[in-house]
Every structure is written in C-alpha cells, then in structure tokens.
Image (cartoon, helix red, strand yellow):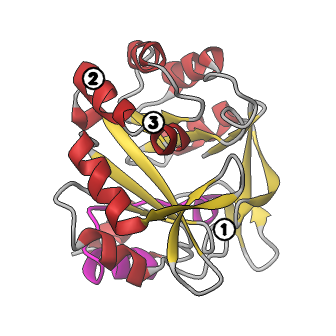
Amino acid sequence: MLLQNGRLVKTVKFKNPTYIGDPINAVRIFNDKEVDELLFIDIEASIQKRGPDYELIAKISNEVFMPFGYGGGVRSLEDVKKLTRLGVEKVCINSYAIENPDFISQAADISGSQSIVAAVDVKKDFFGKDCVYHHINGKNTLWDVVEYVSMLEQKGAGEILLNSVDRDGTLAGYDIDLLKKVTSVLTIPVIALGGAGSINHFVSAVNEAKVSAVAAGSFFVFYGTHRAVLVTYPEKGELRKCLK
C-alpha cells in the first residue's frame, strides 16, 4: 500500500500515482479478506525530507488484524523505536540504506534482524544491466544488485524486499531472472515485488525463482482492463491450491 499525503495511491513504473482511497477503509476491507500481511510505504517522506506520519501509523495500527510493516522517511534509530512501539512488526528501510548501509546494522541491533526489511528498488540501465535505483533523485546508483543485497545481508537485514521499477504497476509479471539472481546468493528471505497481475505470477516467483514470499499492489486494488479501483484479495483456498 503506497501512501502519499495520507492517501492511498498506486504508481506505474514509479510514476503517475493514481488515487485509490483512504488507507483506513482499505485496512478494514483487507481485514475482512483475511490478508496475510500489509506493508505501507510512504513514497514521499524521504523526498520531502520528513519522518514517518506517526499519527496515521497509529490509526492503522489500531485497525489492522494482521501483521504490518512500514517504510518511508526512516532515518534514525528513534524512528525505528517509535514505529516498533506503535505496533509495526517490520520496519522497511530503502533510500537511507543506500546512503548509510551501517544503519541496517544499527537498526537490527536494537530491534532484531527479523524486524528489519531492506527494500531494494531495481531498474535496468540503457544496456539492460540491473542497477540499484535511488528513488529520491530518480537515478540508478553504481551498486551492482547482487553485491548490494549481499552487503545488506551481512549488515543484518532480516529480509530483502526486491522491487522491479520497470515492472511496477504493469501487471505483466515479476522479473523472474532478477529474482533468481538474488535468491541464488542470499540465505535470508526474499520478497518479490513489482509486476504481479495474476496468481500464476505468484506461482512462478515461488517455484521458479525460489522467493520466500510474494507481494503485490495493483493486483489487489485494480480490476479489469480499465483499471477500475476495487480493493480485493483472493480466497485462501485459491492461494493454497496454487502454491502447493
């Protein structure tokens, strides 16, 4: 769930955010649908150089029935402590890990590695090479993806949320080759994100790329070719049957 100025939005390739609705209303729907886990990412907190919206996070915490995580503007150990106290089970760190990789170690020391998720945005360059993408300046970094995720694991990250910028919001399927490249070198869980448009895409990521979990945005909030807003979630039985 992407947050922008307290609203839920969805992007395509990290651009053109479409308004989805009120986050609290979406939480209530997902409660009814028995969703496994929710992750909220404030896509403008770091860009605006501000911290997390603790008031909104507290409201979310009071509503959710399932584990939830938060990312966006997390740049201090006090941020990590506050989020944990509010009931956030997984703190997601993205841009600040690029600027200060040691922050992952520091955060893991106070909250435990199991609570620290390192989010890695990946975008292909002109030559088709997978590069770590810095969403604040909108540019690729010089980090090689495999070297970067390996370093994050060594620093103490408990999970890697691997997001394909080129697939974001397209519903065209995960970048399986990218996922394979990362899962082959890590021992910590990898969560696939970016491009899911069907349950079959979940299956491919789990069975072919060996990811530990799959995440999606557009698949759960849009319906039909015209992308009408419809917050929904597959039946548990349907998911279990496909992922056996």
Q: Characterize the local packing of mark 1: few (<14), some (14-19) or many (20 or more) Cα atoms within 10 angstroms.
A: many
Residue at the location (64% across, 63% down)?
A: 218
Residue 214 position in % (x across, y down) = 39, 63
Instruction: Provide the residue span drawn in magenta.
Output: 200-221
Question: Foreground: 91 or 196?
Answer: 91
The residue type indicated by label 3 comes to Asn
Q: Which residue is mark 2?
A: 111
Q: Earlier in the sequence, mark 2 or mark 1?
A: 2
The residue type indicated by label 1 comes to Gly
Residue at the location (35% across, 53% down)?
A: 160
Q: Characterize the local packing of mark 2: few (<14), some (14-19) or many (20 or more) Cα atoms within 10 angstroms.
A: some
Q: Is residue 203 found left or right of 63 in the rendered image?
A: left
| Residue most extreme to the front | 142
Q: Which residue is mark 1?
A: 169
In this view, the mark in front (2 or 3):
3
Q: Earlier in the sequence, mark 3 or mark 1?
A: 3
